[in-house]
Amino acid sequence: MPALVRPQILLMDEIKLASPLLKELEERYEVVPLESTSRSQFLEDCKTKYADVQAMYRHFKGPAVKVTGPFDAELVAGLPKSLSFICHNGAGYDQIDVDACTSSSIQVSNVPTAVDNATADTALFLLLGALRQFGVAQANLRAGNFNAGLPLSHDPQGKLLGIIGLGGIGRAFAKRARALGMEVQYYNRNRLSEELEQGAKYVTFDELLKTSDVVSLNLPLNAKTKHTMGKEQFQQMKKTAVLVNTARGGVVDELALVEALEQGEIAACGLDVYEDEPKIQEGLVKSDKAFLLPHIGTLTVETQAEMEAVCLRNIDTGLRTGKLGFVVAEQKGKF
């Protein structure tokens, strides 16, 4: 009697922390590691060694990104015909052409909630660093200027935080900001329920820009949200305002941001993401008004372990039931 063929999972990137769960899956499924070293080789391997793969795991900052490049329409068209599920380890999934995946009957998931607290912590750090000018103070200290030549900074208490995109991360950030004595307002395409608002005031996009002391970007990057913040938007903001971005770099026109900082249209910014990562505009790197991190918002042991586990659990659900436990917003109700 022939052995039963086990469904195959292609690990585009290594599972580093959720290894106990991976071992459980290895008992039920055949787990195949990525061996391709270039995009062209990967597409060829999809016709041969990966031809029977049904599920795929990838990490938004993993080594496989450099191998395959973006999962654009060309690459999606070359994926194995057997592939039904792509579980993407990351909150943002702008690296994947979701419409192309949908057309190919490939379900796609991201990690929407496991990242909330770590990203909100990072946003709070950036808010404080930019408002209090901690980056400038630290640079002065390392240069041997102890508490010298520093202008007075600002307290968060009593300031108005405007959140663009009050989803899970935005709400977690709002909770932290309230603990500092800040008021919160927000803009979404659609108003949330009072329960989800948790006291945040719903305002128009323009009103948020004009009245907020801190503007935080917590929205996904897609064709509609690219350059949500540009020259016109910076000119609407208070000259004393701070911009915080822990979403995706592409929601900000970085050249316009550099100009806004240089011309004093806004006071400062705190950034963890950039438009053309890992490249950063030289004007940001050199600016005392820019408090910068290298996209580390979710890089904690606890968060990364849970993100890996979320993906593996969803792959298991998909292979057992034919449907992922959850998919990205654009695919809801389509499978």
Image (spheres, helix red, strand yellow):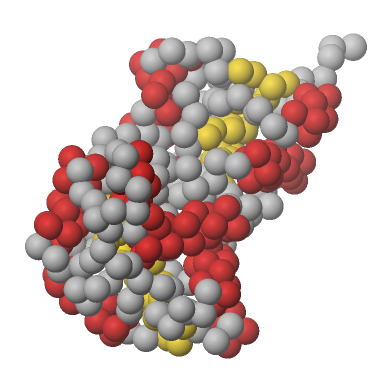
Q: Is residue 182 above or below residue 320?
A: below
Residue 2 in percent (x, y) is at 84, 12
Question: Does residue 247 show up?
Answer: no
- Asked which quadrant contains residue 127, the reply is bottom left
Q: Residue furthest right?
A: 1
Residue 214 in percent (x, y) is at 35, 71
**Residue at the image position 38 percent from the left and 76 percent from the top:** 162
Q: Tell me: 209 left or right of 105.
A: left
Residue 325 in percent (x, y) is at 68, 52
Closer to us: 189 or 150: 150
**Residue at the image position 16 percent from the left and 53 percent from the top:** 258
Q: Is residue 105 above or below residue 330?
A: above
Q: Tell me: 325 left or right of 236.
A: right
**Residue at the image position 74 percent from the left and 39 percent from the top:** 316
Q: Tell me: 241 left or right of 308.
A: left
**Residue at the image position 49 percent from the left and 54 percent from the top:** 122
Q: Is residue 17 above or below residue 334?
A: above
For the C terminus, give its image quadrant. bottom right
Question: Does residue 66 show up?
Answer: yes
Closer to us: 4 or 140: 140
Closer to us: 89 or 170: 170
For the N terminus, give its image quadrant. top right
Residue 34 in percent (x, y) is at 55, 18
